[in-house]
Image (cartoon, coloured by chain):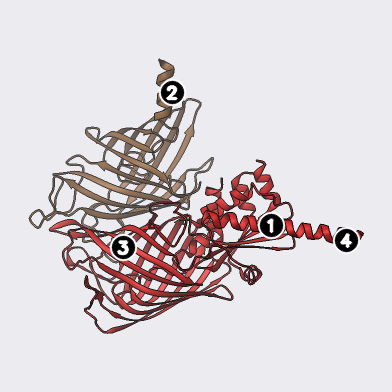
Amino acid sequence: MRVFFIYALLSFGLYTAHAQQSTIVQSLAEQGFENVAAVQKGVDLYITYENNLYRFEAKGLANIIAQLTDTDLSPYERVHFLLRSQDIPMALATLSINDLNAYKSGLIDRYTLASSMQFSIEIERAEGYFKEAERENLSFYKIDVPVGVRVDYALGDIRDGFQSRTYVNSRVLSTFGRGTEFEFDFLNIVQNDIPGRAISSPVTMKVTQSARFGQNTFLSASLGYLPQGKFGLYTRFRNYLDQERFYLELIYGVTRTGYLDQNWVVQNNRNSDALWQAIFNYRWNKYDTDINLAYGTFAAADLGYKFQVQRQFNEVYFSLFYSRTDLASAGSFNSEEPAIIGFSLTVPFGQSKFMKPGRFRARTEDQFYLLYRYSGFSFSGLDVMFANDIFSDIREFYPEVLRKGLMKHLK
Amino acid sequence: MKQTLLALLFVLGSFHLSAQSLTGTNGLFKIPSAYVAPDGHSYIGASFYPKGYYELYGNGNRFTGMPTFITLSFYDRVEFMFRYTHQLGQVVSFETGYFPDRMFTVRYRLVNEGYNYPAITIGLHDFSEAFGGTTVLPNFYASYLVSSKTFETPDLIFGTTLGYGFDLTDSYNPPLFEGFFTGVEVTFTHFPYVTLVAEYDSESFNAALKTTVLGHLHFAVGLLDMQALSGFFTYRFNLSNR
């Protein structure tokens, strides 16, 4: 009889815990989080999800934590969140239930809660727990259409000091499987006073396969019509060391230069280029700053180096750079300059929360990007643009960015 | 009535007084101070130079100048500014030979202010020439060391600044600050909405009045060389979580 009661209690306990996990998963999926699953390992609850609902990853996580404050999590001692992107596991956040309860009752504030949490890009063990788990609201075969604004400008023409071209761009993004994504980008010119060729036309049409391997190694390969008028293949390999503190990146690409005109006919298809680049990056976590040195070929197949310091403030990125390549740069009054300095600014754009991802969703672009090159009359030292891949938003998953983002966005 | 006025002043004003200067960097009126805004604090603004107090190479000083700038602070120590300086009333063309001047400025605070010693900052304005020659001539070049110390009494807050500008280039144009420059800012503790400024910019004496509205908008109006009306406004925003 006693055995029966123990068995019944255990069964009831397991059933209750399972029902609770199911409720959490259903709730997150209904809100629009994707690839959601939950598993229990002893006193640890693991929740995995992909956020395509909030523009900023930390904000998505903050909202999930806020919901958990209304959930009975007494069977657990810790909750682990495994954050995904294109279904690839990216980062792990761990929250103590005691700290959550203290936060709920007002004993600690959001800064203390975020400080007490643990974050890591080491995800292999946690990902292993989800091998058999069934995931809700898969992110595959959905079409996302981000719409945004881009501006090209030219300064320094003595006949017209400020020339600009404004585009409304509409992209089509769709994920077909883990890390497999199709991207199409069309630029529609709405204003233009820059002389030279300018047509509303497609600028990107590619398929990208991104993957994550052991020891924090990421790889992406993009094939098709790539940004900056290139047809071909780009591959990127990046290995992180000591969490996000260091990374080494190798880039290799084989392309032909040309563009698609308004009739989608390939024009000006010139000789092929081999692109290669080696990048070393140090991340100063205290101030979310990347100190980055790249050596290799740049967008115009020019060989040289670029030193860059980039400060991240949550979703805002400000970067200062100095580059020197074998392609001379033209400066003011037609002087030939050996190097280029400049800055870039990336600011968030449009909605901070999107509609729920569905079969088809239109939304605003994530960011607006502005590049300023002090002597910008040549293509010297221009960054290669890769469009969307696993590296596009990877910094949002960095442990310290998540922590600081939670300090800002926890309710 | 008095209470209403005080309440209105409280809403419009702020205890955090303006910190920018005519040149776009942190400073008094024209001269820079050693203070650097906290990490992530940023300013967008414009200032106004009357005729005769501003010169662009090849165009003399016949025009009024309007620098427009964005200033960003990093790491509680570094200040970076990008500035576009326009000559009002001038047309960009081959005939006039005029084109707005672009420049970068970077400042680094070497020493934080302590109880017994001042903050010390090194500044380099219009420095792009030093990195590969990206302009024909720097119009607003300056390099200096500056120190600032604030003293408080029950009724007054004194901000004092002393700096020395030197010429590290063999440029045709003289640097913006050459030799000693100094200044003082005074704020009344019981009326902290306005700051009075008196300074010597290594060439002439200037005086100004600065105020802050709605916590983010800073205004200053003053006299260059104690005779020419000048001023600036900035909008402050914070990119960091702090």
Q: How busy is the neighbourhood of tag 1: few (under 14 within 10 Å), some, or many (20 plus)?
A: few
Residue tagged by mark 3?
B130
Q: CA distance from mark 1 to mark 2?
A: 56 Å
Can you identify the residue that label 1 sits on?
Answer: A19
Q: Chain of mark 1?
A: A
Q: How many marks?
A: 4
Q: Element type at marker 2?
A: helix
Letter of the chain shown red in the rendering: A
Q: Residue A257 falls in which quadrant of the image?
A: bottom left
Image quadrant containing the N terminus of chain B? top left
Badge 2 amino acid: Ala
Estimate the spatial distance between the alpha carbons at disc 4 and disc 2, rounded to whole Å: 73 Å
Labels 3 & 4 near each other (Cβ < 8 A): no
Q: Position of residue B239 (x, y in %)?
A: 44, 49
Q: Nearer the viewer, mark 1 or mark 2?
A: 1
Q: Which residue is mark 4?
A: A4
Q: Are the two marked residues, 3 and 2, in contact with CB atoms closer than 8 angstroms? A: no
Please, is residue A312 above or below residue A325 in the view? above
Mark 3 and mark 4: span between their CA atoms? 84 Å
Question: Decide: marks 4, 2 in contact (CB < 8 A)?
Answer: no
User: What colour is chain B?
Assistant: brown
Which chain letter matches label 3? Answer: B
Badge 1 amino acid: Ala
